[in-house]
Amino acid sequence: MLSNLSRWSGVAAMLGGMLWIVAAIVTASKPRGCIGPECGTMAMRDTSDVASLLLLALLLSAMGLAGMFVRARNTGRLDRWGQTGLALCAAGVALLILGMVLGTILEIFWTLAPLGGLALVIGLALVGIAALRVDALPRWAAVLLIVGSLGMLGFNDQNAQVLMAIPFGIGWVAVGYTLWSGRGEVFQRTEHIV
C-alpha cells in the first residue's frame, strides 16, 4: 500500500514539476510587465491564462510532498527540520490557494499569495535539508529540491525572473522520479532521528 502511495505521489510530483516549467516558459514568452513604480505608466503582464496551470502544479507538488512525508514518517526519518519545513509548506500551500481563489473575489486577498509563496519556499528548503541530513532522498534529488526552492526567492512573473521556476520544476521532477522509482527507499543509515 505504501509503495503504491509513494509511486503515485511520485507521478504527481513529476507532473507538477513539468507544469512549473511549462508555466514559466509560457509566461516568459509574453511581453514584460511592470514592477513597482513602473505600474503607474505600464501594464502588468497578464498571467490569467496560466493561473489554473500554476494552481494544478501547486496541488500536484503538494501531493508529492505528502508522499515524501508519509515515507519519511513511516521509516522514522522525520526530524525537526523536516517537521518544521512540512508545517511551513502546509501553511504556504493553504495561503497560496486562498490568495489565488479569494483574490478573484476581493483584491485584498492577493496579499496572501506572496506570504504563502515565501512560507512554501522556506518550508521546501527545510524539507530538502532534512531529506539530505537523514538520507530520505538521494543526495542529488535533495540538492535539486533545495536549490530549486531557494531559486524561487528570485521569482517574479512580470519579467525574465519567471524562469526561476524552471529549477524549481526540475527539483520536483527529480523528487517525483525518486518517489516513483523507489530509489529513496534504501537508506544508508539505520538509526531513527527525532
Image (cartoon, rainbow, N blue to C red):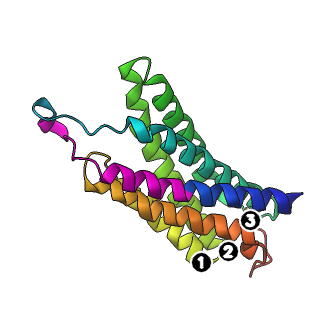
- What kind of residue is marked 2? Asp
Residue 172 versus residue 109 in the image, above or below: below
Q: Which of marks 3 and 1 precedes in the sequence? A: 3
Say if mark 3 contacts mark 2, CB within 8 Å: yes
- What kind of residue is marked 1? Arg
Distance from Cα at disc 1 to Cα at disc 3? 15 Å
In terms of image quadrants, where is residue 68? Answer: bottom right
In terms of image quadrants, where is residue 179? Answer: bottom right
Pick the front one: 146 or 82: 146
Point out the frontmost of discs 1 and 3. 1
Magenta residues (range):
17-38
Residue 89 image point, x, y percent: 57, 47
Q: What is the secondary structure assignment of the residue under circle 2?
A: loop
Q: What is the secondary structure assignment of the residue under circle 1?
A: helix
Label disc, if present, on residue 39 of the rendered structure: none
Label disc, if present, on residue 139 of the rendered structure: 1
Determine if residue 81 is in view: no
Q: Tell me the crowding category of disc 2: few under 14, some 14 to 19, or many 20 or more residues within 10 angstroms, Cα based.
A: some
In terms of image quadrants, where is residue 138? Answer: bottom right
Distance from Cα at disc 1 to Cα at disc 2? 7 Å
Say if mark 1 contacts mark 2, CB within 8 Å: yes
Residue 174 versus residue 160 in the image, above or below: below
Residue 30 versus residue 73 in the image, above or below: above
What is the residue that sits farthest to the left in this orientation?
41
